[in-house]
Amino acid sequence: MSVFTRTHLSDLIYDRILSQKDTLTAQYRSSDSGIGYFYLDNVLPEDIATTIYNSFPSTEETVLKKSIRQFKHVAAQMDQYNPILEEIIYAFQDQRIVQLIGEIATIKSPLPDENLYAGGISMMSKGNYLNPHLDNSHDKDRNQWRVLNLLYYVTPDWEESYGGNLEIWPDGLEKDQITIHSKFNRLAIMATHNNSWHSVSPVTYDGTRCCISNYYFSETPLRDSDHFHVTSFRGRPGQYMIDKILQVDSKIRMGVRKIFKKGVRENPHVYKK
């Protein structure tokens, strides 16, 4: 049996998460008053995680997103790439894993996203960054609430000092962030709600940080105070002018969505099967 089928991959992931369920639950609940999160190392056997990394495409084969908001490469049309990438993405959508992670995060009925709306793969090289932002509150059809962000990092020997690390800002951008190292074979999961400000630190190393991304949704929001919002960016601390520009940008795009519920064009970052 191939170790690269989503069934076998999901078996391995499920068993690994289950073995640490109590520890992960305690980690999530200790952070839930701000931005709930947990992370798990050694998610897959090292040789499998390395094979996944080696299967990533070149950045030239992906979509470049470059603006004052972000600078990175992404892809969601997974049938264009090595099949193992699609298998590992959808392994995280196995119902057993979705339910188990929901139990850890005390979410009753989380739902995976087969459309990979803003999910898929991402690659960040030297000079790339992702400014502080709130993810879009909903799925592509604006029917379900985004509740969890899953990030599986697969670049071997990626040091924290290289940048490209997940940053969460549970006390807002005026306070210090929590940095979660994008360590090889690490799964990081964070809650998404109206105060889930997060970012990715600028990459300073001459290499590429590769990530498998998934989102889980729900029929109800995580918090009663949550409301619809577009993906909203801010400047990093010290980026005064960029911050002002990005706040205006978010207000304009929110104004557009009040008129056009699903936007003026279809978001291209989905998997069209």
Image (tube, rainbow, N blue to C red):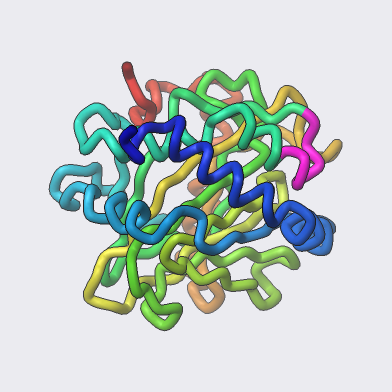
* Residue drawn 52% across the image and 27% down it: 113
Q: Nearer the viewer, residue 249 or 168?
A: 168
Q: Is residue 103 magenta?
A: yes
Residue 30 as seen in the image, left or right of residue 154: right
Residue 10 percent coordinates (x, y) = 50, 37
Q: How many numbered callouts?
A: 0
Q: Nearer the viewer, residue 141 or 205?
A: 205
* Image quadrant where residue 207 sits: bottom left
Q: Is residue 35 visible?
A: no
Residue 21 percent coordinates (x, y) = 73, 52
Q: Is residue 253 visible?
A: yes
Magenta span of residues? 102-108
Residue 218 percent coordinates (x, y) = 70, 28
Q: Quadrant of the N terminus?
A: top left
Q: Nearer the viewer, residue 16 or 208?
A: 16
**Quick check: 226 above or below 114?**
below
Q: Is residue 131 magenta?
A: no
* Residue drawn 66% across the image and 77% down it: 176
* Residue drawn 37% across the image and 58% down it: 154
* Residue drawn 76% across the image and 46% down it: 104
**Quick check: 28 above or below 95?**
below
Q: Quadrant of the C terminus?
A: top left
> Which residue sits furthest bottom?
161
Q: Nearer the viewer, residue 34 or 136?
A: 34
> Which residue sits furthest front?
1
Residue 199 percent coordinates (x, y) = 52, 61
